[in-house]
Image (cartoon, helix red, strand yellow):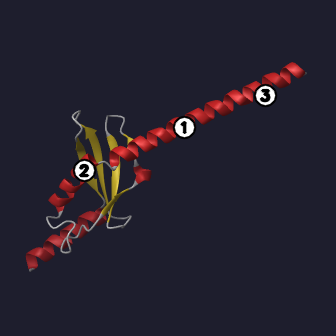
């Protein structure tokens, strides 16, 4: 009986250590994704795209006032890159998506951009107001 108890305890320890190691690996990967998504080079990609959508972005007259990386949205794309969602103006319904690709020289580009319907409606209304003025 003693031998089976020792085997059971050893098995439980191995399982706990394995789960702990996996959790630590996942945590480190998440930190790495956050570091990439919030880097200066990634911000250049975001801001360049947002300024194409709103030439007055980040000013009093623009419709894009701010953005924040949704850290819960981060995941690696199986085809390459890091998928990132930005929350625009603290509005969870106004989202812009990117697939950040490492250019290999310390810079990033985006393989695609996607936006929520509310982002497009807000952008279109803003542009119409500019035309009407």
Residue extending furthest toward the top = 3
**Does residue 128 lie above or below 30 as drawn?**
below
Residue under label 3, please give it: 9
**Does residue 3 lie above or below 109 as drawn?**
above
Residue 73 - label: none
Residue under label 1, please give it: 24
Residue extending furthest toward the right = 1
Query: Measured from the top left, where is residue 109 in percent x and y?
Result: 22, 43
CA gap, disc 2 and disc 1: 31 Å
Q: Is residue 102 left or right of residue 68?
A: left
Foreground residue among 26 and 83: 26
Residue under label 2, please give it: 113
| Point 25% across, 50% down: residue | 113
Report helix, strand or loop for mark 1: helix
Q: Residues within 10 Å of mark 1 (few under 14, many from 20)?
A: few
Q: Nearer the viewer, mark 2 or mark 3?
A: 3
- Of the image marks 2 and 1, the number of the one nearer the N terminus: 1
| Point 18% across, 74% down: residue | 61
Foreground residue among 37 and 72: 37
Query: Measured from the top left, where is residue 86 in percent x and y?
Result: 33, 56
| Point 21% across, 34% down: residue | 105
Report helix, strand or loop for mark 3: helix
Query: Measured from the top left, where is residue 70 in percent x and y?
Result: 39, 55
């Amino acid at each position: 009986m003693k031998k089976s108890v020792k085997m059971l305890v050893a098995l439980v320890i191995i399982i706990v250590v394995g789960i702990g190691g996996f959790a630590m690996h996942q945590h480190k990967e998440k930190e790495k994704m956050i570091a990439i998504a919030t880097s200066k080079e990634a911000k250049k990609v975001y801001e360049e795209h947002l300024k194409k959508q709103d030439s007055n972005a980040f000013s009093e007259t623009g419709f894009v006032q701010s953005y924040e990386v949704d850290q819960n949205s981060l995941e690696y794309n199986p085809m390459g890159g890091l998928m990132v969602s930005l929350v625009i103006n603290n509005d969870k319904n106004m989202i812009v998506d990117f697939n950040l690709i490492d250019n290999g020289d310390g810079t990033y580009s985006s393989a695609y951009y996607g936006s929520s319907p509310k982002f497009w409606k807000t952008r279109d209304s803003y542009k119409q107001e500019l035309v009407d003025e």
